[in-house]
Image (tube, rainbow, N blue to C red):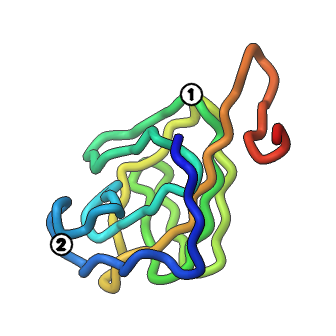
Amino acid sequence: MQQKEFSSLPPRPKLHASAQEASPWYSVGPGIWEYSLNSSEFSSATFTAITHDYIEEVIVLEGGLRDLTLQQEWGPGAYAYRLPGMNHGPYKASKDGCLEFVRCVSVTRGKIKDREKNN
């Protein structure tokens, strides 16, 4: 993990930008861009359901998306709290794409270890 401090986000990528054009943002599905604030582990665009070994919190800031596994849609203000091992995705973005705030929390030896509380 690297230290990050900023007063505004890096420029948001265009809806159909390539991964190289979008950097430091990364794609988790067509038209869906994320910027990681506290993790060096990135999801990648996928067309199958995914799971991971950390807790993930997501807030949709702009646009929207549909989870094709859960058959649910979310728009601005929607919040998700995903425990390790939870199946979710793949996603389809709304026609305007989707901008999300994503927070990842590591899980250690059966206990939740919040990186922000361990300063």
Q: Position of residue 109 (x, y in %)?
A: 75, 14
Residue farthest along the top direction in this orientation: 109
For image coordinates 57% across by 72% down, the residue present is 6
Q: Name which of mark 1 and mark 2 comes first in the sequence.
A: 2
Q: Amino acid at mark 2?
A: Ala
Q: Nearer the viewer, residue 118 or 91?
A: 118
Q: In the displayed structure, would residue 78 be above or below residue 51?
A: below
Q: Classify mark 2: residues with Cα within 10 Å, few (<14), some (14-19) or many (20+).
A: some
Where is mark 2, residue-wise? 17
For image coordinates 28% across by 70% down, the residue present is 31
Q: Quadrant of the C terminus?
A: top right
Q: Position of residue 116 (x, y in %)?
A: 77, 47
Q: Classify mark 1: residues with Cα within 10 Å, few (<14), some (14-19) or many (20+).
A: some
- Quarter occupied by residue 102: bottom right
Q: Position of residue 4 (x, y in %)?
A: 56, 59
Q: Nearer the viewer, residue 38 or 89?
A: 38
Label 1 with label 2: CB-CB less than 8 Å: no
Q: Nearer the viewer, mark 1 or mark 2?
A: 2
For image coordinates 57% across by 66% down, the residue present is 101
Q: In the displayed structure, would residue 49 be above or below residue 76?
A: above
Q: In the displayed structure, would residue 48 be above or below residue 15?
A: above
Where is mark 1, residue-wise? 53
Asked if residue 89 lies left or right of residue 26, the reply is right
Q: Position of residue 49 (x, y in %)?
A: 38, 40
Q: CA distance from mark 1 to mark 2?
A: 29 Å
